[in-house]
Image (tube, rainbow, N blue to C red):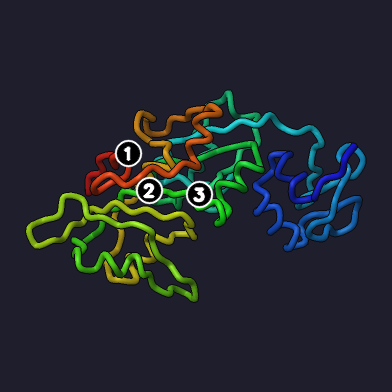
Amino acid sequence: MESVRIQKYIAEAGLCSRRAAEALIAAGEVYINGEKAEPGRKVVPGTDKVTVSGRVVKDQPQPKLTYVMHKPRGTVCTNSDPHGSLTIFDILPRALAGLRLFCAGRLDKDSEGLLVLTTDGDLANRLMHPSSTVVKRYHVILEEPFPTGKLGQLLKGAIVEGEHLKVEHATLINPRRDGSSASLDVHLHHGKKREIRQLFLAFGFPVKRLRRYQIGAFPLRGIPLRAVKQLSTKEIASLFATPRLTGALRAEKAPSLHAD
């Protein structure tokens, strides 16, 4: 049988994404035939024994399935949470319980909206890798109105804890007469942890609500809260598409998000 790189082997087994597998290897959590794995090392499926954090990785690959979820606030994107928080896997339909799904681009506990879950490690890697420039679109509600004159600062960005945070597009939604609004449409294609929240906070505008309403050309519209939808090949391809800007928003209008 043909050998494969260890990070790809782990991803195809549905344990985690390829990038996450690389992190596990670097952390010394991966062993091949009892020896600590090195990045890029190859294994032969069915012959070599691979363990991750002490657990044997099964050779049988999972079927490549991809779903989207309308994530509710208050849930975390991990398989288990030491603090006892409800996870997105706790609310999955029972029919999907046997699949080793993982998130291809997370949302923090306080955020909601479109989330991709897949057993396909290669797809997850493509969606999350910076070179893919997959555009994510968010509807943001702030604690205080944001002035139109400061929109350029969001595009230029700010250094927060040594990282340069910025967005690719920002538009006020239904601005007031003074040219400000607490509601914004924001697009970015990288998505570091809590990037939008940290960026607005750096400029003195805490985020009250945040919803991801579109990935590529695939919209959240029509998917009820907490619901899961399996994607077709065509819909998966739409995750990588980049519609043109049409007025204040891109092709998909941001769903209503009240500041309650």
The first of marks 3 and 2 along the sequence is: 3
Circles 1 and 2, Cβ within 8 Å, touching? The answer is: yes
Question: Which residue is outermost to the left?
Answer: 177
Which residue bears the numbered disc 3?
A: 106
Q: Secondary structure at mark 3?
A: loop
Is residue 22 shown above or below 100?
below
> Which percent across, then down, holds residue 39?
78, 59
Q: From the viewer's perspective, is residue 71 above or below residue 165?
A: above
Q: CA distance from mark 3 to mark 2?
A: 14 Å
Q: Earlier in the sequence, mark 3 or mark 1?
A: 3
* For residue 182, side relative to residue 74 (left or right): left
Local SS, label 1: loop
CA gap, disc 3 to disc 1? 21 Å
Residue 152, horizontal then vertical, whole percent:
28, 67
Give how far across and how far down residue 76 sits, in percent: 49, 47
Q: Which residue is mark 1?
A: 252
Q: Secondary structure at mark 2?
A: strand
Mark 3 surroundings within 10 Å by alpha-carbon count, few (fewer than 14), some (14 through 19), many (20 or more): many
Res. 137 mark: 2
Q: Tell me the amino acid under the disc marked 3.
A: Arg
Q: Earlier in the sequence, mark 1 or mark 2?
A: 2
Left-right relation of 190 to 2: left
- Residue drawn at x 82%, y 60% is 38
- Quarter of the figure with the N terminus: top right
Residue density around tag 2, few if under 14, some if 14–19, many if 20 or more, within 10 Å: many
**Callouts 3 and 1 close, C-beta under 8 Å:** no
Q: Residues within 10 Å of mark 1 (few under 14, many from 20)?
A: some
Q: From the viewer's side, name the closer residue of 221 and 32.
A: 221
